[in-house]
Image (cartoon, rainbow, N blue to C red):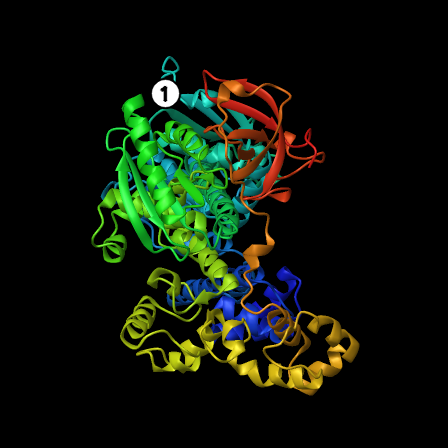
Amino acid sequence: MLTIAEILAQELGQKQEYVDNVISLMDEGNTIPFIARYRKEMHGAMDDTTLRALESRLNYLRNLQTRRDEVKKSIENQGKLTPELSAAIDNAATMTEVEDLYRPYKQKRRTRASVAREKGLEPLAAAIFAQDGQDPAMLAADYVDEDKGVSSIEDALAGASDIIAEDLSDDASIRKSLRELMSRKAVLNCKAENAEEDTVYRLYYDFNMPLSRLLDHQILAINRGEKEGILKPVIALPGNEGAALVCRAALKPTIHVSSFVRAAAEDAYARLILPSLQRELRADFVDRANKGAIRNFALNLKPLLMQPPVKGFVTMGLDPGYRNGCKVAVVDPTGKVLDTSVVYPTFSEKKKQEAISILSGLMRKHNVQHIAIGNGTASRETEAMTVELLRSFPDASYMIVSEAGASVYSASPLAAEEFPNYDVNLRSAVSIARRLQDPLAELVKIDPKAIGVGQYQHDCPQKELDSALGAVVEDCVNAVGVDVNTASRSLLQQVSGLTATTAKNIVVYREENGPFTSRTQLKKVPKLGPKAFEQSAGFLRVPESKELLDNTGVHPESYTAAKKLLELLGLRKGTDLSDLPEKLNAYGTAKAAADCGVGEPTLLDIVKELSKPGRDPRDELPAPILRKDVMEMKDLKPGMELTGTVRNVIDFGVFVDIGVHQDGLVHISQVANRRLKHPSEAVKVGDVVNVVVLEVDEKRHRISLSMKQAKQ
């Protein structure tokens, strides 16, 4: 039997020694970002996604082994564990297979079969199931016993039938064969509880689809419709194949086939096995769809968090609204609040001109260069006012920013702690301004579920969703690095090796002692021990340090190697090192790595960091689209070619913001000139793409777009 490490090596296509090393590193308490970045020689440069897949599969296989041991122990305690059964349990590759094998020995609630066994009818069932030509009624005559509750031959036969049916239902091989058959040929039939009622689920009012072709978003939509009492789905296996399969397993191929055993087998299928497998298959498909939805959310969340920041500018945030007005916040290039206000541009033309006058004053006073507008209620009117405002400020521009989660954040204890002197509504305007300046730093303060780039994420198991999204946030934060002197507590606690407590202690320490001047100073922070320092130091930046390496992704454990490399190449720290990669190539990477005492992957990472100290990987991505004018849905015409930003990628297409307040849909068939299994194969959130307008339905607020018909 293969070990867990051998199974993982085969499944992931990785060398055995690399998998062994990763398992050891994880068991020692090292985090995924730390392993991915600073232990490349030990795992062959697996990326964080592969490492997380390994971690997830490792946990499953370990839980599977634990369950195998529990099941064997339980059966052994009953005195029924045979060498064959033990081997079968050890070779079971899934939890389902283990539970199938355990089923006959599992403590059951009181059933018709267990009642029959209590009446002493098990020997009768065995004799009938032997199918040796004896008449079941003749056999049953010996089991009629009023004292045991068997008052007639019919009672005895009914009890024997129940026992045979339950035994067949508990047969692992029958269940496995039937499960495979249903996976291939079963159909999901869906009807409406009330076909006269018009709902968003009308597409599924008379819906039939083979399970093998059922898509994740269809499963989740039907699931939600059922929860709301609108849809009634049923998994069915057309024809008589299911019952025939059970009969073939139960009946002996004799001249006189037992009609009694056939009837018991058909009863086992219809009453016990089919309902059980219907529930199981439904649960499996929902589980698959949930995992797909979680994977899709994570896929969209990463590029959203990694959107290029619009750094170094004074920014105005506008949180639109009707009744309570448009909330305004001006922040400096570091995100510090300079000014706030509330204007009422939707009340009347007079109020709109007053708003423009107030905002113009703020623009001039603080030299505002960018405006971030929330995309919620009254966003359209606020954008129109902004375009009018910018006629007097030709060098300024604006961008529509997703305000998903801003209201949740602004009412949170974290926001109250950060802005104790500001009204809840004004806090959201600050958040919107900061989302333009540094999306990652601001969005980490918000529950990822509230960011709104998924598909049915609120229907998914929340524990698994939180775990997956937390991993994405952690990977993004650590990929970018964190300025230890300006980062919020929320951002710091996402750093590898840090917790909410150590993040808070870092903030308290810098408030009491002033900015950090070196990475080693972090060791003075309470509760930040040697292991936490090892895991976090490489991801924390200290721009104020005299040590250049403290503002790079080079880990302190590699400082000696980095200095040795510069010495070998005749370079000095602090000078322009942009030509470092060329000098290394001339010297020889393998030779330099050996001379510096590190592996080649680590050496190449050191070179990358030294050649661009303080680099932000997000700066290499396409810049976000900043606008100066406004366009409305009525301005769109089929055939128009526009530039837009991808806002969401889901199973059946891509939603693109083309600047008209209503995202357009690029159906999966219009994404690329090749067949795609999923739109994410061609595009991701934040991508700037060219699209052609196919159709505009103003009444239903729908815009159909094509990417493949546009020049990319």
Q: What element carries label 1?
A: loop
Using the rendered image of the protein, determine whether residue 102 is visible from the camera's viewpoint.
no
| Depth check, front residue: 455 or 519 | 519
Tell me which corner region of the image, top left, top right, bottom left or bottom right, holds residue 569.
Answer: bottom right
Give the residue displayed 50% in from the left and 41% down from the top: 395
According to the image, label 1 marks what residue?
193
| Depth check, front residue: 336 or 182 | 336
Seen in the image, is 561 located left or right of residue 125? right
The quadrant of the image that shows the C terminus is: top right
Give the residue displayed 28% in from the left and 29% down from the top: 322
Query: Residue 589, how many percent across, how many down?
Result: 74, 77
The quadrant of the image that shows the N terminus is: bottom right
Query: Residue 644, how many percent across, how many down?
Result: 56, 35
Query: Residue 20, how many percent across, how many down?
Result: 58, 74
Vertical placement of 124 versus 674: above or below? below
Give the residue displayed 40% in from the left and 58% down from the top: 334
Query: Residue 370, how many percent across, how many down?
Result: 45, 44
As shown in the figure, which amino acid type bears the numbered disc 1?
A: Glu
